[in-house]
């Protein structure tokens, strides 16, 4: 958007229809960005990487741009072109291209002035070839050939380099026990399982990238459990495979306690013991590396040539050339067969080793944070490097090498180490007198936790982990291993320049950071302080771990100087008030790499851990709480596709696409989960503000559910909109339009808050005669998704209904009553809703409304903050466990909603803000 005017395109007139789709003349390729200088794509960290293993990203296009089915290429300064593999990600309603996906070969893109150009891509070096048989899928990249299983337990049956096998039998492994370590009487019974592939699908075939999707489960003596989806990515020019693995926790947490989760494989070994090497990447660019049979530090020196070769990972000279004392006595040098690296927490890891089973472990060394890469192999016989993304951030984790003295070694990437305490995902407290709804409401009033027996259930949540495996002809140089570790720990990324996204008018109302008057500077200053603060809090407060990493806490406890980790609904945030969106818009505005990575970790977490993927709550997410799955409020507002869209389109991440597609029929989950089931059962006069009609409508006919407009329907609209633009299937557009028309037809429109919804037709039916305000209806992405939606379809009656809501939600009491006939009780989050007021002011060209919107935004909001511009201060000494930073009056609700309001208001009210003193 430019300035303060929202540019609305011409719509195709239709006398017979009340909805029209915007149409534009087709543009020539490249014409649309003529006014925007600079590159099309840029490296996230603003520096050219030393290398990478291949990557993909999404590229935005303004409406009217033709899709080039003939192909695209990546051009740098001087006109040199690099091969791209391209595909459509999303379409505008008129059939023009909205987003394209592009894959680049390993090491590519390391030039200045990167632009996407039309035309046939040059042939990629070491192109990717895919061959499918009845039994397996073979992917060949250069001289590396991978064989992927279509059934059985091995996800990678073998990997060959130059015809020689260097890796085989790669599978998932898991273990669980039948009781908790802490509560068990007697020894727990341990069960083991490994991957069992059900289906294998080739999603892309090359020539730059191939993608193979596997679906299956873990199978063992206790049956099938932990369903998984795994994608394997192969890029031209790379000897590695990237693995994105997602498991569903589909077990009863009171009956099975997961102990170990790993990715295991074998490496054939033929080199002499002293030419076999083990490597673990260490802290701050360090590397630990030794031979299986060491040749250094001996009483008898084999000579510099032997020592230097073994340390470097090269083949040593023939042992026969060594001094007799070494040559004849080498068999007495103890060989080491097993090696472990364990990172039990975010602050330290330890390496140990032993000669083999039945013998004791020897301490090697310790350090702080491991990047998560290991290697086992020979100087000439080849080997495998194995790594995990977000390694030290996701403890307890580990790396294992076993059998290094035999014919084949086994490596294991533990994404939950088996020697750590077993997972205990049971709900954290008993009933505590809250067996019925009335007493559960009393509990909610004091701890902010919406408790209900049996509903704090982890069954159905998920977690995604990324691995990378290299098939190598020989032990790499130490510097090369460190490059590989760094590229997994912090992958180089090409991203569409935010200016390109903005020029294409995507994701609604936002604008890049820009210079302006003193008020704009103060607003930008607070925005930066809050971003910096939350990024810093992740590390200060150690918000790490298998289930926790990616989330933040909800509310701060200034007395204890800690976040309220143990107080009901004040603990883990679980996307409350659109934290995910706040971070993604902050990235779009700033282009900051640290903001991107925090938003990425949050998207991975909130889309998996905070959402149910199977079972009775499938399609719904869990409200904020002490445990991510603990609160009994299960709603679409958390599973919300609006929180995933930015990441999906910027990265082309297929798993994120799966998560959004899972939600297109999640409205049916409301047949079994009545969100408003407790609101009538209250003791005393403690009913929610604004009345109950926004959250409940009593008994409904078959096929109908009650649905709030903002926290449920708008979240579903985000999923339907995404599916429509990805597939061009008009069914999803029509479903959205049916809802828009029916809301507009309700007597009180958006002020009704919610109404009965017919699942078959997608229409709201009945109700809507009573004003029922919920401040939450506007703060879960509805403003942002509506700003997009109204540019794609034009339903005039709905548009006016929405603008009425925007204009009058924050209106003075007398104006609100004059408009609606109601008092307006329940209209909280005034500052957050200032962007609604501003939107109506711009759309209706109302200067007085714009002035009111600015006053609302600059006001204290609902918290009467002592320090509205948020000062950072440091706390240390006896009142805290460790020195910490605090931000005055901080609340994640406030930070997220203020940040989103600032994002929109800096555009909508930009002229007023820059003129203010």
Image: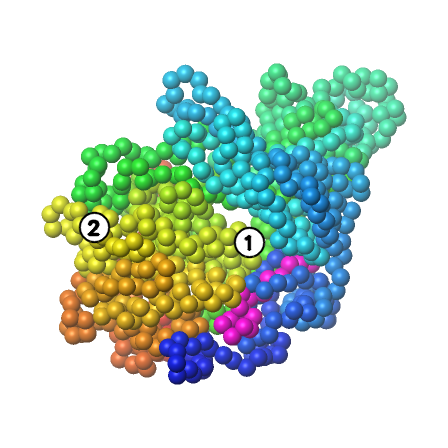
Magenta-colored stretch includes residue 633: no
Q: Nearer the viewer, residue 242 or 499?
A: 242
- Does residue 512 appear to the left or right of 916 in the view shown? right
Q: Nearer the viewer, residue 911 or 763?
A: 763
Can the viewer see residue 518? no
Can the viewer see residue 756? yes
Residue depicted at 32% across the width and 40% down the height: 455
In the image, residue 220 sits, relative to residue 667, either above or below, namely above
Residue corresponding to mark 2: 679
Quadrant housing the C terminus? bottom left
Residue depicted at 68% across the width and 69% down the height: 70
- Does residue 240 appear to the left or right of 711 in the view shown? right
In which quadrant of the rendered view does residue 4 lie? bottom left
SS at badge 2: loop
Residue depicted at 74% across the width and 44% down the height: 145
- Region in magenta: 90-108
Q: Are marks 2 and 1 in contact (CB under 8 Å)?
A: no
In the image, residue 402 sits, relative to residue 102, either above or below, namely above
Q: Measured from the top left, where is residue 257 in percent x and y?
A: 44, 29
Q: Nearer the viewer, residue 529 or 163?
A: 163
SS at badge 1: helix
- Per the rendering, the mark at residue 654 is 1
> Outermost residue toward the left?
684
| Distance CA(mark 2)–CA(mark 1) | 39 Å
Magenta-colored stretch includes residue 103: yes
Quadrant housing the N terminus? bottom left
Q: How many marks?
A: 2
Q: Measured from the top left, where is residue 595 in percent x and y?
A: 48, 56
- Does residue 257 appear to the left or right of 751 in the view shown? right
In the image, residue 704 sits, relative to residue 359, either above or below, namely below
Q: Measured from the top left, where is residue 177 in percent x and y?
A: 46, 25
């Amino acid at each position: 958007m430019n300035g303060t005017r929202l540019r609305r395109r011409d719509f195709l007139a239709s006398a017979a229809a009340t909805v029209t789709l915007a149409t534009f003349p087709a543009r020539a390729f490249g014409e649309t960005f003529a006014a925007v200088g600079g590159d099309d794509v840029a490296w996230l960290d603003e520096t050219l990487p030393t290398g990478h293993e291949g990557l993909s990203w999404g590229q935005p296009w303004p409406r009217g741009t033709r899709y080039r089915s003939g192909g695209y290429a990546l051009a740098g300064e001087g006109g040199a072109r690099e091969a791209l593999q391209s595909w459509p990600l999303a379409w505008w309603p008129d059939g023009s291209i909205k987003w394209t996906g592009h894959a680049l070969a390993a090491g590519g893109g390391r030039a200045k002035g990167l632009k996407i150009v039309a035309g046939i891509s040059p042939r990629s070096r070491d192109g990717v070839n895919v061959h499918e048989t009845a039994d397996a899928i073979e992917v060949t990249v250069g001289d590396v050939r991978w064989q992927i299983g279509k059934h059985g337990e091995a996800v990678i049956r073998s990997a060959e380099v130059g015809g020689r096998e260097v890796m085989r039998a790669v599978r998932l492994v898991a273990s669980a026990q039948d009781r908790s370590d802490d509560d068990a009487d007697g020894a727990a019974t341990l069960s083991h399982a490994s991957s069992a592939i059900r289906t294998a699908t080739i999603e892309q075939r090359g020539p730059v990238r191939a993608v193979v999707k596997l679906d299956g489960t873990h199978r063992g003596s206790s049956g099938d459990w932990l369903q998984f989806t795994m994608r394997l990515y192969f890029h031209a020019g790379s000897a590695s495979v990237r693995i994105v693995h997602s498991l569903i926790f589909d077990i009863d947490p009171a009956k099975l306690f997961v102990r170990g989760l790993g990715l295991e494989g074998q490496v054939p070994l033929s080199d002499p013991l002293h030419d076999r090497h083990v490597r673990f990447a260490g802290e701050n660019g360090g590397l630990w590396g030794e031979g299986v049979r060491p040749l250094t530090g001996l009483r008898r020196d084999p000579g510099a040539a032997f020592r230097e070769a073994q340390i470097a990972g090269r083949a040593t000279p023939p042992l026969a050339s060594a001094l007799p004392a070494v040559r004849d006595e080498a068999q007495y040098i103890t060989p080491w067969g097993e090696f472990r690296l364990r990172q039990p927490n975010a602050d330290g890891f330890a390496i140990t080793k032993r000669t083999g089973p039945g013998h004791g472990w020897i301490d090697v060394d310790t350090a702080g944070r491991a990047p998560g890469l290991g290697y086992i192999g020979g100087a000439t016989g080849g080997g495998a490097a194995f790594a995990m993304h977000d390694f030290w951030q996701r403890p307890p984790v580990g790396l294992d090498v076993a059998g290094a003295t035999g014919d084949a070694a086994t490596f294991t990437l533990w994404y939950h180490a088996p020697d750590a305490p077993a997972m205990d995902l049971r709900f954290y407290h008993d009933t505590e007198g809250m067996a019925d709804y009335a007493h559960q409401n009393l509990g909610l009033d004091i701890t902010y936790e919406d408790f209900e027996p049996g509903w704090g259930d982890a069954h159905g949540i998920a977690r995604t982990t990324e691995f990378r495996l290299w098939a190598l002809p020989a032990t790499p140089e130490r510097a090369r291993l460190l490059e590989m570790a760094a590229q997994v720990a912090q992958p180089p990324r090409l991203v569409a320049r935010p200016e390109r996204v903005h020029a294409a008018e995507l994701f609604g109302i936002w604008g890049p950071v820009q210079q302006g008057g003193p008020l704009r500077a103060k607003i930008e200053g607070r925005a930066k302080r809050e971003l910096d603060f939350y990024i810093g809090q992740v590390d200060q407060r150690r918000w790490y771990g298998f289930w926790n990493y990616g989330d933040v806490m909800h509310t701060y406890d200034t007395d204890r100087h800690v976040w309220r980790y143990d107080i009901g609904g004040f603990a883990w945030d679980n996307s409350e008030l659109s934290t995910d969106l706040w971070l993604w818009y902050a990235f779009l505005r700033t282009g900051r790499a640290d903001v991107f990575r925090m938003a990425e970790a949050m998207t991975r977490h909130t889309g998996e851990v905070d959402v149910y993927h199977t079972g009775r709550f499938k399609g719904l997410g869990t409200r904020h709480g002490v445990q991510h799955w603990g609160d009994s409020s299960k709603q679409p507002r958390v599973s919300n596709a609006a929180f995933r869209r930015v990441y999906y389109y910027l990265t082309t991440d297929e798993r994120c696409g799966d998560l959004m597609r899972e939600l297109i029929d999640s409205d049916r989950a409301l047949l079994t989960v009545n969100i408003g089931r407790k609101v009538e059962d209250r003791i005393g006069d403690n009913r929610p503000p604004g009345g109950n009609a926004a959250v409940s409508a009593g008994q409904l006919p078959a096929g109908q559910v009650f649905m709030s407009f903002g926290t449920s329907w708008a979240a579903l609209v985000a999923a339907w909109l995404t599916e429509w633009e990805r597939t061009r299937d008009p069914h999803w557009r029509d479903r959205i339009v049916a809802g828009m028309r029916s809301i507009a037809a309700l007597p009180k429109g958006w002020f009704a808050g919610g109404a009965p919804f017919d699942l078959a037709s997608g229409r709201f039916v009945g109700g809507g005669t009573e004003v029922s305000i919920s401040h939450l209806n506007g703060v879960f992405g509805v403003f942002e998704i509506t700003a997009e939606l109204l540019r794609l379809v034009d339903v005039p009656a709905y548009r006016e209904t929405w603008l009425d809501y925007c204009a009058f939600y924050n209106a003075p009491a007398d104006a609100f009553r004059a408009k609606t006939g109601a008092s307006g009780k329940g209209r909280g989050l005034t500052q957050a809703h200032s962007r609604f007021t501003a939107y109506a002011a711009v759309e209706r060209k109302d200067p007085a409304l714009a002035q009111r919107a600015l006053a609302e935004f600059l006001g204290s909001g609902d918290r009467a903050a002592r320090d509205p511009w948020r000062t950072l201060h440091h706390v240390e000494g006896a009142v805290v466990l460790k020195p910490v930073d605090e931000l005055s009056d901080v609340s994640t609700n406030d930070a997220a909603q203020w940040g989103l309001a600032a994002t929109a208001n800096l555009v909508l009210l930009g002229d007023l803000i820059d003129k203010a003193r």
